[in-house]
Image: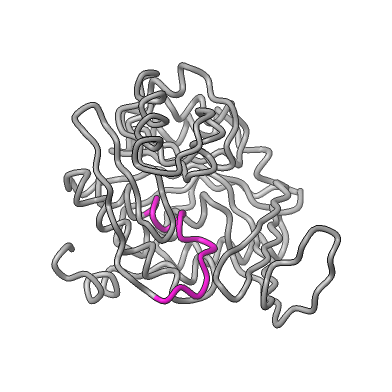
Amino acid sequence: MSILIVGSANVDHVFRSPRLPNPGETILGQSFAIHPGGKGANQAVAAGKLGGSVSFVGCVGLDADGALLTQSLSEAGVDLQYLRKLDTPTGAAGILVGDEGTNVIVVAPGANAFVTAAQVAAALDSVKPKYVLAQLEIPIEAIEEVSHADRFILNPAPAQPLSAEILARCFALTPNETELEILTGIVPDDDATCQAAAWKLLDKGVENVIVTLGARGSYWVSQSGNRLCPPPHVNALDTTAAGDVFNGALVTFLAEGRDIANAIDLANHAAALSTTRPGAQESAPSRSELQAFAPWLV
């Protein structure tokens, strides 16, 4: 079944070092690399590599970075008829990765700032997707438009205030712990506070809140109950795109008709597998790799 992913496309400039520098500190890094990235494009590639029928709505520049992103999306089988190419620089991200796998990221939007509501509306009308997925690295007008889709999943990253109307239309909201705190004012440092924060969002009309917890997996809260969904143990090398892989996998398996608990478990495994190798889009597992890693789930 068709999936529409609306979001950002960036080129990631990744610096690796033994640890992350403190404010005002300069340290020597170990390596530097350029990778295709951006939350929306990462999620589209993750869904495409897992076998999803994916169309991507976004903007890139008429530059080498835009060409790199277009190639990566195409190789993952993503439909790009709603990707606009503009005479403006492609979005870029600076990523610092420490040896322990943690990272810090700064993003310059570039062409992502020009994704329009009209562009989204045209894609929704043509694709008629079973599920849509969006993030918050593009203008809020585009998010408001895509939120009218029947099965709307929002990854609220980077976190920002959201209208009551957008929240009420969410089939699922997928914040990490930091984003959940920004959205609710509650620090989710244990199961009780995770539930309390999630219920603030459920009370605003969100059907499912799925909090991504890094190495702890994810925490799913809905009107019918709550569940901690632990991930498999892996030796993490790079967590850069783990959340994006989780979201791309989640929407893929929901679109296949799987129940939400199974889709979350599969997304946890896909995200965990992605942390065992470097890069953003390159780290997303294929369907066959996920089947080999978690054959009892797929």
Residue sitting nearer the eye, 24 or 33: 24
Identify the residue shown where x is 24% and y is 51%. 263
Instruction: Answer left or right for 143 relative to 256.
Output: right
Residue 273 drawn at (x, y percent): 37, 70
Say which quarter of the image contains residue 173.
top left
Residue 122 drawn at (x, y percent): 47, 32
Identify the residue shown where x is 40% and y is 18%. 204
In the image, residue 205 sits, relative to residue 64, either above or below, namely above
Asked if the stretch drawn in magenta spans residue 112, the answer is no
Instruction: Answer left or right for 36 relative to 156.
Output: right
What's drawn in magenta, residue-wise?
A: 235-248
Residue 159 drawn at (x, y percent): 57, 37
Q: How many numbered marks, from 0 up?
A: 0
In the image, residue 161 sits, relative to residue 273, either above or below, namely above
Asked if the stretch drawn in magenta spans residue 239, the answer is yes
Identify the residue shown where x is 32% and y is 47%. 251
In the image, residue 13 sits, relative to residue 83, either above or below, namely below
